[in-house]
């Protein structure tokens, strides 16, 4: 049986300087291809979109 499809909310933050935006390179395992998107990620149950965005941004800059 196929895995049921669901919509997962995400929170995205756009960093812009002049004519440029900061993006993250990601890999789509279904399409086997790379793509770019602004920083962000999934919103966990009980978490606000702002909390999710801050958590995702912290994880990028924690290294």
Image (cartoon, grey):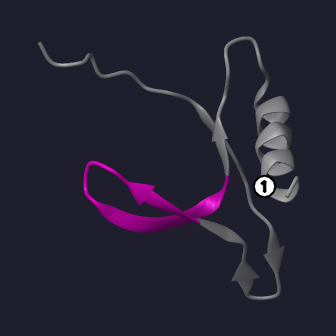
Q: Position of residue 12 (x, y in %)?
A: 68, 48
From the viewer's perspective, tell me whether residue 61 is left or right of residue 9.
Answer: right
Q: Quadrant of the N terminus?
A: top left
State which quadrant residue 61 falls in: bottom right
From the viewer's perspective, tell me whether residue 47 is left or right of residue 23.
Answer: right
State which quadrant residue 50 falls in: top right
In the displayed orientation, state which residue is furthest to the left: 1
Q: Quadrant of the C terminus?
A: bottom right
Taking the spot 86% from the left edge, 47% from the top edge, the residue there is: 58
Taking the spot 72% from the left edge, 84% from the top edge, the residue there is: 20
Q: Main secondary structure of the magenta part?
A: strand
Label count reads 1
- Residues in magenta, as a range: 25-39
From the viewer's perspective, tell me whether residue 35 is left or right of residue 54.
Answer: left
Residue 57 among magenta residues: no
The residue that label 1 is drawn on is 60
Residues 33 and 49: in front is: 33
Taking the spot 43% from the left edge, 26% from the top edge, the residue there is: 7
In the displayed orientation, state which residue is furthest to the front: 63
Q: Position of residue 10 (x, y in %)?
A: 61, 36
Q: Is residue 49 above or below residue 18?
A: above
Taking the spot 80% from the left edge, 47% from the top edge, the residue there is: 59
Q: Position of residue 8 (x, y in %)?
A: 50, 27
State which quadrant residue 56 falls in: top right
Residue 35 among magenta residues: yes
Q: Is residue 54 above or below residue 24?
A: above
Q: How crowded is the residue under tag 1: few (<14 C-alpha within 10 Å), some, or many (20+)?
A: few
Q: Is residue 6 above or below residue 18?
A: above
Quick one: SS at disc 1? helix
Q: Position of residue 42 (x, y in %)?
A: 62, 34
């Amino acid at each position: 049986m196929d895995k049921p499809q669901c919509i997962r909310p995400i929170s995205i933050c756009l960093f812009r300087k002049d004519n440029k935006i900061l993006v993250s390179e990601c890999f789509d395992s279904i399409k086997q291809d790379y793509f770019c998107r602004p920083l962000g990620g999934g919103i966990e149950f009980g978490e606000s979109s702002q909390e999710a965005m801050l958590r995702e941004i912290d994880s990028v800059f924690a290294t």
